[in-house]
Image: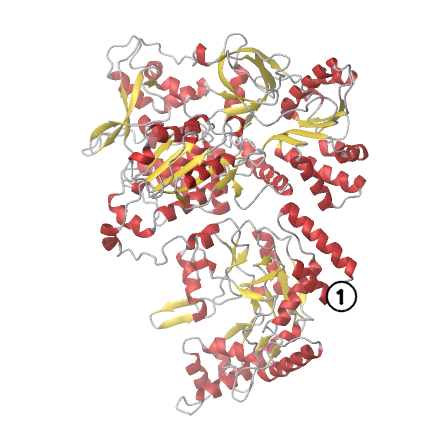
Amino acid sequence: ATSFIYCVAAELDWAADVVAKRLLDVKEEIKITGTYTHTSEEIESGARIAWRNSSRVPEDWKSFEFRDYRKMETPDRIFSAVEEYLNIAKSGTNIRSILAVFKPKSPNYAYGTRFWSSNFINYAGYQDRQGVIGDPETLEFTEFLIQNKLWSPPQKRSEFDILPLVLKMVGEQKPYIHELSKESTHEVAIEHPTFRKIRQLGLRCTGISAISNKSLNLGGLEYQCCPFNGYSISSQVAQKLLKRNGVYEKLAKAMSIAMSERLYKEKVEHELQIAILHSFEKAGYAVRDPEEVAAALSKHCENERLEGRECLSQNPKVSTDSPPNVTVGKYDSSYEYPQFESLCIHWRAMDGPYYEYTKSLLPAKKSTGKESESYSRDFQRPLVLIAFASERGDAESVALRLGRALRVCEPIVKSLDDVKRLNMLTEHPITHFIVLCGTGDSDGFPLVAQSFASTPFAPDLLKNVKFTVLAFGSTLDPNFGQVGKELEKNLIGAGSNAFLPLTTVDGVLGFESFVSDWLGLVKRIVLPEYIQAALSVNDIADRRPSHRIKWLEYVQPTGSIEQFNWPEKSASVCKKNDELIVDGSMTGRSTRRLTFKLPQGMSYETGDHLCVHPLNPLPLIQRFAACFEDELLAAAAKTGEYPFPRSTKLGNQVRSLWQMDQPFNIERIENGISIPTQVRFETPSTLSDVLQAHVELTLLPHELVNTLLLLRRLLNLEVSSTTSATLKNEFEGKDAEAVKEFDRQSYTVIFGEGREKEAAITSFLAQYPTIVDLLEGFKTILCCRRPVLPHDDGNPRLSLGNLLAVLPPLRTRTYTISSSSKIDSSKVSITVAVLRSTAANGAKIDGVCSNYLARLRPNKDRAKIWVRPSSFRGPKGTKSPVIYIGAGAGLSGIMGFLKDRVNAMKKENGEAGECHLFFGCRSVEDRIYAKYIDTWEKQGVLKLHLAFSRATFTSPTHIPDLMNKFGPELCKLLLQDNTLYYICGDSKVASDCYEACVHVLQEHGNLSRASSIQHLNCMREEGRWRCDLWGVMYHFNSTKASLRRAALLPAESWLRKFGQISTKAHHGENKHK
């Protein structure tokens, strides 16, 4: 960066103080964010130097037009910029040389946004029995686009079909395609002033040649998307046309030149250049002949020598593209910085964001398919051990997905404690050890990993084992990724080698796209193509799933499903359940305060989190039972006499509900033999208990693909993207239509890529928010009995056993504690916003945990809760100034700190530093804890700043508005070296308030933006900027559809401002609150 700034300064003749200030700003920005941003002036100057150093029409380096398109970040805006570029390039009767730059490559990625097209306007090339039709230089690229269904050629292929523009965005596997408008292609029909027959040949070319596959490195920032163009040269245009199949012969015939004549090709080329010069000038496009180019180049070299610069083309070479006796200067291969560089042909790999890294790890030679026979005897079958450890189920969920991805080598999937307890690393010849871990109490190891973590390994114990670690967490936590780092350190100490470096998944910034890429990368490394080919013979992946329920001795019937109740020893009594907003109700909007009596031996500190294990609602369980009524009735019929009607609809419902209360185990059937299987809940149990308390019925984005793959196998639909789905003859009438509809809706969810897949998942979950909604939508083809056939027992395609084997565990939810441990440590309170939304089909969808908590009856119902220590701690004492920010239920964590402050001020006779509370909600009716806060304000405990976003009596305001209004005082507080800043709530609020702080410091503190960011960063490093945030609730379709992207982007923006995201801090699952 420093060298580049000096280079630009010399070109633009900057004063010494300007250079010094710019270098200081660049270094400060790099220190804070890890990178820096060029000004448009710097990019333009660097581009002109690169143009001057290149062999691309060097005399144009001063006159080309520069376009800064860095703000064009979406595919639509980039393609719109390309159309604008091409229209500007053709100006009047001349060609304007243009160079444009788009957003540079981020240092966090292996590559940046780039065009796969080598030129904005390319002609297609097709292989034919008689040779190549069209442009032979694009033959491979054209076939790639067609084979991957990225582009469909015209029904009648021709010599001059224009290829679409192909754009590859960062982090997305599938490229974007854009068909250029006819006006933007600027085609020129070739004709000769004398030989009229040449026009009849239909030869064409583009009047503007915009190169789009070069990279420009300026001061460490790599612009991999920087198209540029100059004028055309007749000899180069002629050579491109003459490379086409049969063009020499057709031109010779049109010019009446005998192919037997000596130098007939040279004559053809000479007359073709005359035709090109004539055609371009007639169409209004600038073109030069080789002699003009040679003269211009000679003049350029002379000018460079006069300026005291070396000209790389002082010794011009003879171009084989030129006609006889014409010498065109070309640059030597020596390098002068900055320069344009050629990009790799990225589309040939099609491996996504890990292409550059993965390529060095996989075998250099690709399998041809025939190699499997020779490899089958020599290769070592990888024995893979996948271990997970987390308290919210995210690591276990991904571990099971990885197990399914590696199923051909039959991996072992266990918790970390089971790995330790069973001595699996020493008792088995493990080749690959893959660990997926979350963060436990006090930011330490989860409970299921503490035994493993505390066990030392002998040196070289794992010298033959390769490993990798995927760590879940949040960059909002001070010790983000620490658990993964300690595991990595322990495994390296035992002699193991990492086949992939430690990877951390940030819970605030999203989850699915990154984990999918990571799973694919691990699979390619652990199972190269030749191993997969050898193992595929015995692959059981495509067999139908084979789990079944084994019903045990029946118990006394009840005919109804009872509410599950936790045993007294493992649960806490709900003492209070109060509504906090005016006119709140169980059917409308509601925010509640719940108080629990802590079990003996459990304690907490103010600011800790309370984990709650929710229950699925009974109405949802009853709907689930109705879906599997046929199977439940068949099981009930085998148990003997029962004291309720047999044939009526009511009797069927009672019998199926009675069967739900019968104990069962789950078996797996292999080769006709029943063997026990591991599921995510204890057995024997009852369906009623399992569905209420142990399995997740909400369809989760990261589990959806595996669920749909199971259902597609059961319906005999294809489960590979390489073949299209086929429907079997067993489906007729409405069932056949239902199968087609399921195939249509599920195909893109499973096999789609990038934004197409994300949109398909969002749409699918909007229609089917729970597994019950999905089963009800396709009940007849999944859950109902079928006619008995000679080779078919008629049982439903989807059995309870198969479904229960894949349903994820019911996840606990985490809430910030609202109470103060210093006032009463035996009880704990939380604040819960009750979440309700409506699905796309109109069904009412309630938040599982918030509605469960809202239904708890004080002094009657028990809930399974436990305290999870956190690093979110209040001020020590009352002397330091404090700024508290909370919106809605985000006030929850702050209430405990305020209660501690009130208690401390009573002991210190009211002496305390300033305390400002910025609180926002919809309206006056939505103010929670209003009586407490108003009383404390009157007592001088705090100064309240209120914002109402939907107020009817005044204009809407938000918390950042209040912060800007309070600007001078807020700036003074932020600049004090003992001020504490707390924010609790949504990450979008955090991002907006952060920007307000930056603006206040700039406006009232006379600081630059970089200095303001640096100051806030210092506050965080000193422990004076503290936050307890969450991003978005994934369980709600209205939230998911309208807020997911809006919430994740501010969260990412907020973290980047603090420099929290490194090359390993990637997107991951949200931290649920």
* Quadrant showing the C terminus: top right
Residue at the extreme front? 459
Q: Amino acid at mark 1?
A: Asp
879 vs 794, nearest the viewer: 879
Secondary structure at numbered mark 1: loop
Splitting the image into 4 quarters, where does residue 809 fall?
A: top left
Vertical placement of 1018 versus 208: above or below?
above
Query: Which residue is tagged 1?
Result: 13
| Residue 668: quarter of image | top left
The answer to whether residue 987 is above or below residue 303 is above
Q: Point out residue 297 in the picture as x, y percentages from the top left corner.
A: 63, 80
Residue 139 shown left or right of residue 219 in the figure: left
* Residue lying at 70% horizontally and 14% vertically, measured from the top left: 903
User: Going 53% across and 29% down the picture, which residue do you hit?
Assistant: 443
Q: Nearer the viewer, residue 54 or 752?
A: 54
Q: Is residue 410 above or below residue 721?
A: above
